[in-house]
Amino acid sequence: MKKGQVTIKDIAKELNISCSTVSRALKDFPGISPNTRKAVKELADKYNYRPNAVALSLRNQRTNVIGVIIPETVHFFFSTVISGIEDEAMKEGYNVMICQSIESFEREADSIDALMSARVDGLLVDISRETSDLAHLQKVVEEGVPMVFFDRLVEGMNAPSVIVDDYQGAYDAVEHLIQQGCKDIAHLAGPGNLIIGRKRIEGYTSALEDNEMPIKKDFIVECRNGTQEEAEQAMDQLLASGKKIDGVFANNDMAALGALKSIKKAGLKIPEDIAVIGYSDWQFCSLVNPSLSSVSQPGYEMGKEACKLIFKEINKTNIEKSTIKILDTEVVVRESSNKLGVIQPLAN
Amino acid sequence: MKKGQVTIKDIAKELNISCSTVSRALKDFPGISPNTRKAVKELADKYNYRPNAVALSLRNQRTNVIGVIIPETVHFFFSTVISGIEDEAMKEGYNVMICQSIESFEREADSIDALMSARVDGLLVDISRETSDLAHLQKVVEEGVPMVFFDRLVEGMNAPSVIVDDYQGAYDAVEHLIQQGCKDIAHLAGPGNLIIGRKRIEGYTSALEDNEMPIKKDFIVECRNGTQEEAEQAMDQLLASGKKIDGVFANNDMAALGALKSIKKAGLKIPEDIAVIGYSDWQFCSLVNPSLSSVSQPGYEMGKEACKLIFKEINKTNIEKSTIKILDTEVVVRESSNKLGVIQPLAN
DNA sequence: CTGAAAGCGCTTACAG
DNA sequence: CTGAAAGCGCTTACAG
């Protein structure tokens, strides 16, 4: 027996019939004698025949592979997205090719090229932070390859997106603090140049307005790099300023953790004196002390939805290119904001 | 202009020359007139020609894709491995196809089939927990497709592996506790049926022996499912038993966290009364209070090494099939075991 | 310097 | 019921 995987040709030769017949027998085509069919199938089984997907791709002009561009696989949120993509793709008989941009424009462009060369049937992209020139993506659209953006919204590109409702997530978080009885809520905000950061500030502001609570500019503190230390310092200053504060909504979980530290250091009780809620719902939220309330983002679902959209595109289902699918966030209440002691179903 | 990506044929037609010439011009073959070369390249550029990797794969009998089977992408350790694989593969001009087995034998077998159908040049596999029948992997070997195991050792298979030295990791952790002055060290062990769990028990035992410390059977407590709660209870019992304990080596970080809780509950100080060290070095280790010492596993490096091994196999470099590459772990000292107050370089 | 032909593995319209 | 031929996109030995 020759090495390597067996082909239709090998089977045809051994059985002294043509490739066409083998191909048809394998696919249970009508008009194949039961005997040949049986002989072919037995041999295919014996030699463990597997159709060569490469040859099929070339012939069908369709690879059944979708390409994914993502900043990093090691971040929890991204890995849940990938998981959702994998599951949905597998269900549809698709394979997935993943490239990490590690937030580099150059690497993103290279990856797009590699994936286009591989003739993926569609592209799912979470654009890198560094990317502002969109030419490489524009080409994808021009060449008619289906593309869907996820996570980070890209403007001015003729392709659908699936994103998370950052405004609503922030709104809900603040609304939750208010329901718990907080009156003076500070916001540790993200850098002002990112859309998501601005959306969350808007959500914070709207929630206060809707509850007829004053918006104080000095209660919104920008944390540029989102580290724990930075947030801890920011919180230290807020507390030292003598302002009355009984709630904190942090733009991310790390910052919330910094706030937790600062508040504990000041000898105040969480959540009794100050309630805290973060954003993203990292895995560690349930492990720290006190456990941290947070706004969870549906990464897995986002992956699935992006995949579903791309399949629609691939199958030419009529789909509005400007579709923006917005997924809901969820407030996960843990000790750090649970003033009322309401029992919360185990959210993990 | 026709839709879809441009082919050599399109360029040939437009220039009224043959495909062969276009192909050669594109590749700077000698014996092509400068004029044709220039014309071809300009057109290729204009139409953004990208070689069709599918056609190339079919012709070259090599896809430049490697397949990866991994239990889950959402676990931090696994995602670092994937990251290592991606980086190394990209460096060599390879793409990566990832399938998650989610610890299911059936899904693993299906994924192997899909990847073999796709004619990946090599397979990197972290076997599922459920897998005991190895027939699907045996076939891969028989069909001559290069395969490398990583993370979990698979016995009786003719393929190289790259794993982590669990014995040494455990040994080092216990040795570290001893150096910090611990005399009575308990071990929250993993389930006895897993090789890694047994290796770590051996490491624990050897370290004690080499330091002429007694090995007490009742200081080794099995934690079946490795949850925080389970470990907390186990630790509660150990403390309640009145045994003198001043150090704990936990088989995993979650268990260590449980131990931390239990010890705090008992009003004992960490690390002064009891020092604690975990295993795996999850991201949360530096975030909990006190921050948790742990044994870090080189996931990224493991991915790179596995990739390097598979490339050697693919390129038929002489490589011993029984190669087992063993990677070193590292003890990362944080507050939970730092009795001597030695300053530790920031490890992250 | 350039082209026609064959082949990678598969499918399918066409012919018998 | 079965086979020969063409074609997916590319490369390369062979011929000129």
Image (spheres, coloured by chain):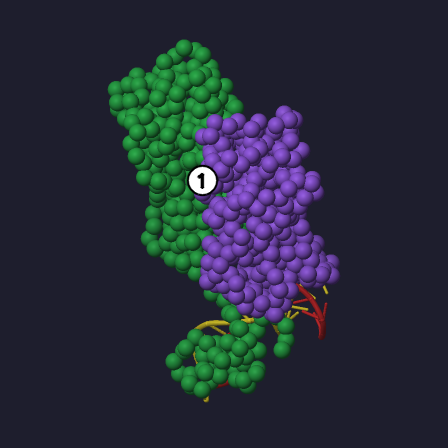
Chain colours: A purple, B green, C red, D yellow
Quadrant in the picture for residue A65: bottom right
Q: Position of residue B196 (x, y in %)?
A: 42, 32
Please say if A164 is above or below B20: above
Residue lying at 56% horizontally and 50% vertically, measured from the top left = A197
Q: Nearer the viewer, residue B174 or B191?
A: B174
Q: Residues within 10 Å of mark 1 (few under 14, many from 20)?
A: some
Q: Nearer the viewer, residue A335 or B278?
A: A335
Residue lying at 59% horizontally and 44% vertically, measured from the top left = A216
Label 1 residue SS: helix
Quadrant in the picture for residue C1: bottom left
Where's the C terminus of chain A, which quadrant?
top right
- In the picture of the structure, the residue carrying the numbered disc 1 is A233
Residue lying at 52% horizontally and 63% vertically, measured from the top left = A132
Q: Is residue B34 visible?
A: yes
Q: Nearer the viewer, residue B291 or A108?
A: B291
Q: Position of residue A314 (x, y in %)?
A: 66, 60
The amino acid marked with disc number 1 is Gln
Residue lying at 67% horizontally and 50% vertically, measured from the top left = A326
